[in-house]
Image (cartoon, rainbow, N blue to C red):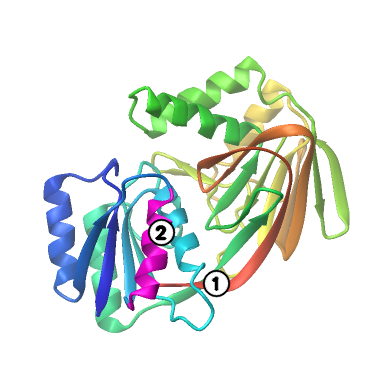
Amino acid sequence: MRALFIMNPQATTSTPRTLDVILRTLASELDLTVAVTEYREHASELARKAAADGYEMVVSLGGDGTVNEVVNGLLSTPEGQVRPYYAAVPGGSANVFVRALGVSGDPVEAALTVLDAIRHGREREVNLGRVTSDRDNRYFTFCAGFGWDADVVQQVENERASGRRASPALYAEVAVKLFFRGDIHDPSLRVEAAGRNLDDAYFALVTNTTPWTYAGALPLQPTPDSRFELGLDAFALTQASHPLTGWILSQMFFPKGLPRHGDGYVTWHDQESLRISSSHPRAFQIDGEYLGEREEVNFRSIPKALRIVC
């Protein structure tokens, strides 16, 4: 089977020795060609070209941002062109998509899982989320966020640009700093879903699976019933006092996640579509990648959008 191996050279968990082991492992079953990304959205271009060049599989090594780019490249395959299978080897700091699939966050262990799946013909189809706005038309694999969490993502990207390494500790540091600085205290969001509209939300998440993210080994689950096989779930914060918000966030660490009903927040489950808008531009992110500020975004669940080997 011909496969294109798309590698992000900035993958935080990748070392030359680890990369060599991964490539040797996969090359035992695949005819591999290696491509290294050089700029943002390059992985999308490579994945799109892989389909045009007749590759049967695309494998990526990188974090959730690389996964998102590859997925969007694959799903932009023109009608009538065969779309390659996809396998993801984790190389980032969180690797939410891979771990939500039940695959190890260790890149070598994940490569062995992919190898076993290839040998046994194991695959699955997963739903994706799709966002559209006056500036967007793209897919996300596990989450999209409006407000505070997108502010965190943006600040972490700024910290990385200044030379700091992405890590769970950095995300936690930035999140706490923004939380107490007051960035979360902006009730400008409106969520419209299933005939139930909510005004004056402080921040909102749309999820395609659980968890929302990881703090090291610990999953944060604001929408614990969210699944790749279902529609979209959503969470909106409706109160922003420090004690209450801290309590809500702490419940997300519980093994069963945040209860579907509680004080200070509203959730939606298994939605085909929804819309989030703001009275003024707010930070927006998908799959942990900052997209800029938006005032309105539409979300839709796309059933069985992606074929995964895992």
Q: Position of residue 208 (x, y in %)?
A: 59, 58
Q: Amino acid at mark 2?
A: Glu
Give the left or right position of residue 75, taking residue 247 as reference.
Answer: left
Q: Which residue occupies the extreme top position in the image? A: 181
Q: Amino acid at mark 1?
A: Ala
> Looking at the image, which is closer to me, 56 or 247?
56
Q: How many marks?
A: 2
Residue corresponding to mark 2: 45
Q: Is residue 161 above or below residue 7?
A: above
Disc 2 and disc 1: Cα gap in Å? 19 Å
The magenta span reads: 41-54
**For residue 254, which quarter of the picture?**
top right
Query: Which image quarter is the C terminus in?
Result: bottom left
Q: Tag 2's secondary structure?
A: helix
- Give the class, few, some or many, for how many residues have Cα within 10 Å of label 2's Cα (few <14, many ≥20): some
In the drawing, what numbered circle is on residue 305? 1
On whether residue 49 falls in the magenta region, the answer is yes
**For residue 109, which quarter of the picture?**
bottom left
On whether residue 200 falls in the magenta region, the answer is no
- Marks 2 and 1, the one that precedes in the sequence: 2
Q: What secondary structure characterizes most of the magenta part?
A: helix
> Looking at the image, which is closer to me, 82 or 248?
82
Q: Residue at x 41, y 59 (%)?
A: 45
